């Protein structure tokens, strides 16, 4: 629902901020007061092309901003989320037009392209009149209206399930058939790649082990020198550390009989001697394992070169190459069994196609029945709305194959003159006729159009008297399920409004400004009297205005 509209430096509007409520909101005012400018501002929010002349003379830019309440409209919030815009229960749309003609659009403060803005904004507001944002001008809306009117949502959902499953299997089969066309070439390529990796007999730990062994071999002479000299110094040579410690131990033990305080020191020396003898033994063992095999180093270098080449060719890590090999093996198996898989998919596709066609036929039959009821109900409504000679049809165009929305396309057709064949309404209906047609649809099928805010422009064009009263009454009824904004010149229509907004011109410091104010009580009676009697407001017109308001209240 639209809560607030703010317009700044737009045409002859300096700054205008207006609050809208749920129910029936009517906009009235003298010709030229600026009602069409307000509609132009809505059009800009809905994605109309920006023009430099929209910017108020002397201003750098014009701004139009609207605040919407999306409580309970998870479907609309999801649409915005799917387009990348986070939306809570309140949403702000803003459009800025510079005097150069350039424009920017924002959704909750995030920059949006017009291609993003237009389809999203049209889920919030539809303008009924000779306007590109009139939803009835879009043929894809006609089918949605019919389905909602006929309460066919469950059947449509069931059909969509079958259709999506059928499309999924069809794409898989197409992919498989495409793969089969290049099957042998692909198989040869995969087998070559898989064989090359398999021949290398890779293991994830091998490279690390080879690098460690290469480092050892490259430094074998240095390792031998250090360990050999260490062994000799500790144990092997005359005057080695162990020999000296052995002598010291014997001496300390001999004098420990004289002074027992030296006994612990003898034990400590003995402990050190044992430790150093163990170190010398390990050094000797290490020397025994050291090798100087030039052939082994050469073999390691060759193996590492193989690993480097495979990593450059396939993946930067051995584990990733092995994973790639598993993928190759799986694809080889799929291609080798492609014939069997193709037959299975083809059989499954045939079953799903048959199911989809059956559900499509059942949906088509239900749509035909709903179309008959809709046409009958709509003609009755149009008769009340000063279109007694009109005829309305719903044209069904069968599809050769089941489509996303069913087995047919539909289009609303209308004839406004008796004896004339029905033609697409987008070609023959005027703005006022389109508005009244939408009003009739909203009246007989409140849920048919899910847009929460509907703006009616020209709905009173060319009518008056009883027809105008009928229009007002139907707008009042429709406003119980949708927020209605209606621009009208007819007091018979305005009398049914829950909220009355007056658009007027003012001159301030030599400049003309458009303003809008919500009126009630005596002010509303005065405005209604003006609409009834023009410039001459008399006691009679005032009484008539009061009576009109009183009799139009539900």
Image (cartoon, helix red, strand yellow):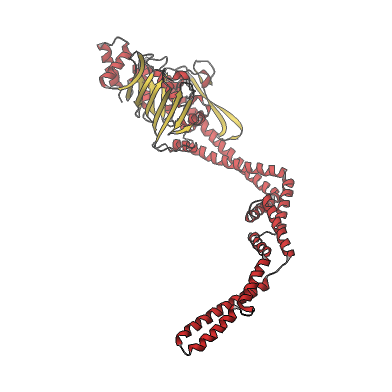
Visible in this render: residue 546?
A: yes
| Residue 535, above or below 294 | above
- Please, which residue is most extreme toward the top here? 536
Residue 390 appears at what percent x and percent y? 48, 18
Identify whether 169 is placed above or below 426: below
Report whether 330 appears left or right of 266. Answer: right
Report the front residue among 315 and 226.
226
**Quadrant of residue 168 within the rendered picture:** top right
Residue 121 x/y as whole percent? 46, 30
| Residue 96, percent from left and from top | 44, 26
The residue nearer to you, when weighing 201 against 170, is: 201
Seen from this angle, which residue lies furthest bottom?
A: 257
Can residue 377 be seen in this snapshot?
A: no
Percent coordinates x, y for residue 83 in the rendering: 49, 36
Picture quadrant of residue 526: top left
Q: Is residue 411 left or right of residue 552?
A: right
Q: In the figure, is residue 23 to the left or right of 401?
A: left
Please, is residue 407 above or below residue 182 in the view? above
> How many discs appear?
0
Q: Nearer the viewer, residue 146 or 277?
A: 277
- The residue shown at (57%, 40%) is 164
Quarter of the image that includes the N terminus: top left
- Quadrant of image for the C terminus: top left
Picture quadrant of residue 71: top left
Which residue: 56% across, 34% down?
406
Work out whether residue 386 or residue 543 is closer to the camera in this orientation and state it. Answer: 543
């Amino acid at each position: 629902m639209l809560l607030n509209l703010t317009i700044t430096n737009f045409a002859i509007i300096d700054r205008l901020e207006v609050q809208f409520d749920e129910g029936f909101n009517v906009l009235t005012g003298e010709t030229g007061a600026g009602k069409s400018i307000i509609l132009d501002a809505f059009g800009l929010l809905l994605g109309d092309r920006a023009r430099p002349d929209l910017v108020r003379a002397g201003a750098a830019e014009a701004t139009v901003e609207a605040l919407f309440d999306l409580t309970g409209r998870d479907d609309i919030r999801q649409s915005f989320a799917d387009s990348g815009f986070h939306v809570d229960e309140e949403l702000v749309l803003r459009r800025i037009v510079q005097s150069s003609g350039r424009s920017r659009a924002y959704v909750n403060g995030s920059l949006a392209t017009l291609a993003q803005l237009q389809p999203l904004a049209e889920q919030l507001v539809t303008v009924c009149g000779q306007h590109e944002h009139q939803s009835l001008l879009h043929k894809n809306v006609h089918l949605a209206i019919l389905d909602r009117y006929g309460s066919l949502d469950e059947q449509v959902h069931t059909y969509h399930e079958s259709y999506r499953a059928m499309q999924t299997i069809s794409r898989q089969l197409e992919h498989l058939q495409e793969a089969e066309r290049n099957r042998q070439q692909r198989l040869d390529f995969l087998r070559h790649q898989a064989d090359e990796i398999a021949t290398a007999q890779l293991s994830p730990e091998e490279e690390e082990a080879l690098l460690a062994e290469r480092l050892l071999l490259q430094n074998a002479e240095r390792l031998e020198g250090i360990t050999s000299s260490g062994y000799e110094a500790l144990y092997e040579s005359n005057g080695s550390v162990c020999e000296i410690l052995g002598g010291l131990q014997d001496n300390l033990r001999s004098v420990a009989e004289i002074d027992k305080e030296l006994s612990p020191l003898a034990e400590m020396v003995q402990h050190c001697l044992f430790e150093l003898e163990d170190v010398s033994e390990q050094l000797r063992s290490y020397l025994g394992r050291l090798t100087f095999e030039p052939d082994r180093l050469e073999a390691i270098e060759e193996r590492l070169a193989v690993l480097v080449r495979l990593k450059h060719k396939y993946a930067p890590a051995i584990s990733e190459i092995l994973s790639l090999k598993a993928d190759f093996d799986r694809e080889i198996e799929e291609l080798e069994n492609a014939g069997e898989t193709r037959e299975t998919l083809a059989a499954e596709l045939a079953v799903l196609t048959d199911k989809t066609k059956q559900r499509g036929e059942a949906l088509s039959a239900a749509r035909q029945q709903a179309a008959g009821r809709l046409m009958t109900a709509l003609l009755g409504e149009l008769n009340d709305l000063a279109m007694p000679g009109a005829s309305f049809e719903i044209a069904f165009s069968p599809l050769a194959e089941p489509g996303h929305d069913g087995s047919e396309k539909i289009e609303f057709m209308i004839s406004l003159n008796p004896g004339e064949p029905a033609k697409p309404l987008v070609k023959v209906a005027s703005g006022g006729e389109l508005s009244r047609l939408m009003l009739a649809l909203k009246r007989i099928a409140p849920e048919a159009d899910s847009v929460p805010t509907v703006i009616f422009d020209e709905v009173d064009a060319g009518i008056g008297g009883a027809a105008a009263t009928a229009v007002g009454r139907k707008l009042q009824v429709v406003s119980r399920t949708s927020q209605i904004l209606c621009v009208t010149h007819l007091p018979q229509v305005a009398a049914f409004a829950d909220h009355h907004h007056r658009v007027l011109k003012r001159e301030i410091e030599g400049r003309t400004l458009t303003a809008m104010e919500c009126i009630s009580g005596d002010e509303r009676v005065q405005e209604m009297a003006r609409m009834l009697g023009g410039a001459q407001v008399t006691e009679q017109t005032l009484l008539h205005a009061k009576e009109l308001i009183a009799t139009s209240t539900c």
